[in-house]
Amino acid sequence: MKVDRSKRLISKLKINSPVTEQFKLIRKGIEFAGIDNDYRVILVTSPEAKSGKSTISANIAITYAQKGLATLLIDADMRKPTVHQTFLKSNLKGLSTALVGETTLLDSIQITDIENLSVMSSGPIPPNPNKLLGSKKMAKVLDDLKKQYQIIIIDTPPIRFVSDALELAPYTDGVIIVNKSGVTKKEDMFQVLEQLRMSRSPVIGAILNNDKEKIEHQYYYSKKENY
Ligand SMILES: Nc1ncnc2c1ncn2[C@@H]1O[C@H](COP(=O)(O)OP(=O)(O)OP(=O)(O)O)[C@@H](O)[C@H]1O
Ligand SMILES: [Mg+2]
């Protein structure tokens, strides 16, 4: 049976549900962490697969949109893209077609039913995602998008298996690392932090995602100093 990813969005929950509140806390954490640096282009990644990156990036994007900021969620996971499924959109055009010049930026973006939130799905899966994501064209696309959107959240593949997120991270203002409770090993987290440091990509913080505990305890935000 096909899973309906759109059900995982906080916009489907009651306005003050505990999960919505946890995502607002994450947004506030990012804002506090960004007092000295303005975090407008935020990359979400994790050491391993299935940690909740896509769920978390979509919901963080929604909290910014609900605050009234013009927000764009980009699916830079060209290996296992999900943004188009989550927002029930087509994936014929998107980041890959914009990067190879097949579509204009405007044509590559789709509005959602959530006010202030647009999405750029991955587009058809290219043979060389890491090359595209690390290209000068990618940096230019982000610069152009920054003129139109106040916040850009980027969903990416896991960092330990493919280089895509590491290629892209230096073009962003900061990285959020999603750790899966009971799964992510401390040494893997340290390795990811080191890789990001070497690529000169600022780490904003980490989220510990626990899909086993009661829903109100699921999301925690901590600054990188805790690691
Ligand atoms: N806190 C949570 N509580 C319950 N289920 C969760 C939670 N976080 C994620 N999930 C579920 O875990 C699965 C994986 O989540 P998601 O697709 O967001 O992970 P991902 O890190 O993007 O995976 P991938 O590495 O494949 O891109 C999904 O079915 C999602 O609904
Ligand atoms: Mg994902």
Image: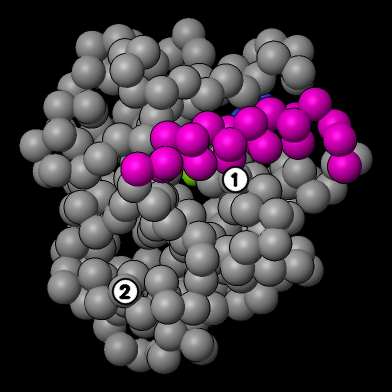
Q: Amino acid at mark 2?
A: Asp
Note whether residue 203 is visible: yes
| Secondary element at image label 2 | helix
Residue under pointer 2: 143
Residue 102 position within the rendered picture, expressed as x and y whole percent measured from the top left: 35, 90
Residue 176, image quadrant? top left
Tell me: residue 114, above or below residue 27: below
| Residues shaded magenta | 15-36
Identify the residue shown where x is 75% and y is 31%. Answer: 21
Residue 30 lies within the magenta run: yes
Residue under pointer 1: 60
Identify the residue shown where x is 22% and y is 18%. Answer: 190
Residue 71 position within the rendered picture, expressed as x and y whole percent measured from the top left: 58, 64
Does the beta carbon of the residue at mark 1 sit less than 8 Å from ligand 1? no
Identify the residue shown where x is 76% and y is 43%. Answer: 10
Q: Residues within 10 Å of mark 2 (few under 14, many from 20)?
A: some
